[in-house]
Image (cartoon, rainbow, N blue to C red):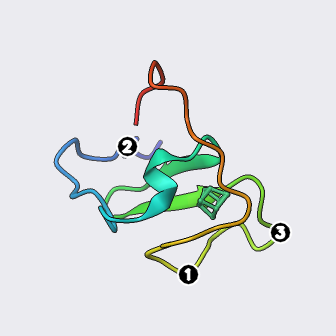
Amino acid sequence: MGALVSAPDDLPLPFPTSLCHRCAHKRDVKSARAWFLRCVELESKYAPQPVRACPLFALRPATENP
Ligand code: SF4
C-alpha cells in the first residue's frame, strides 16, 4: 500500500498577481510539488497565467478562503 502524499503547506502562491485569486471560479489544485489554478468556467480548465483581465471574472465573496 502506497503512502499518501499531501501538498506541503509551504508551497509558494502561484502567480500572486493573477486575477484568478480574487475570482469565485478558481479552484486550487495542489500536488506534492505544485499548486495549479484551475478555472471551473473555462473549457480548457487552466488559463495562461498570470491572468490580468478576464470576461468571466466573478468577485469571490470576502468570507471565502483564498
Ligand atoms: S473566470 Fe477568469 S479570472 Fe476567474 S478563475 Fe477563471 S480564468 Fe481566472
Residue at 47 percent across and 60 percent down: it is 19
Crowd class of label 2 (few under 14; some 14 to 19; many from 20; radius 10 Å): few
* Residue 52, horizontal then vertical, whole percent: 48, 73
Number of numbered discs on residues: 3
Tag 3 and tag 2, C-beta contact below 8 Å:
no
| Mark seen at residue 48 | 1
Residue at 36% across, 64% down:
34
Looking at the rendered structure, the kind of residue marked 1 is Pro
Image coordinates of residue 10 in percent, x first then y, are 16, 48
Q: What's the amino acid at mark 2?
A: Ala
Contact between marks 1 and 3 (CB within 8 A): the answer is: no
Distance, label 1 to label 2, CA atoms, is: 32 Å
Q: Nearer the viewer, mark 3 or mark 2?
A: 3
Q: Is 1 on the left or on the right of 39, as rendered?
A: left
Specify the quarter for ligand 1: bottom right
* Residue, far right: 43
Report the residue marked by disc 3.
43
Indicate which disc, 1 or 3, sits on the residue closer to the N terminus.
3
Q: Could you tell which of marks 1 and 2 lies nearer the N-terminus?
A: 2
Q: Secondary structure at mark 1?
A: loop
Residue 65: % across, % down: 42, 28
Does the beta carbon at disc 1 come under 8 Å from ligand 1?
no
Q: Secondary structure at mark 3?
A: loop
Q: Residue furthest top?
A: 63
**Which numbered circle lies on residue 3?**
2
In this rendering, position of residue 66 left or right of residue 53: left
User: The residue tagged with tag 2: helix, strand or loop?
Assistant: loop
Q: Residues within 10 Å of mark 3 (few under 14, many from 20)?
A: few
Outermost residue, left side:
10
Q: Which of marks 2 and 3 precedes in the sequence?
A: 2
Task: Say which quarter of the image contains residue 39.
Answer: bottom right
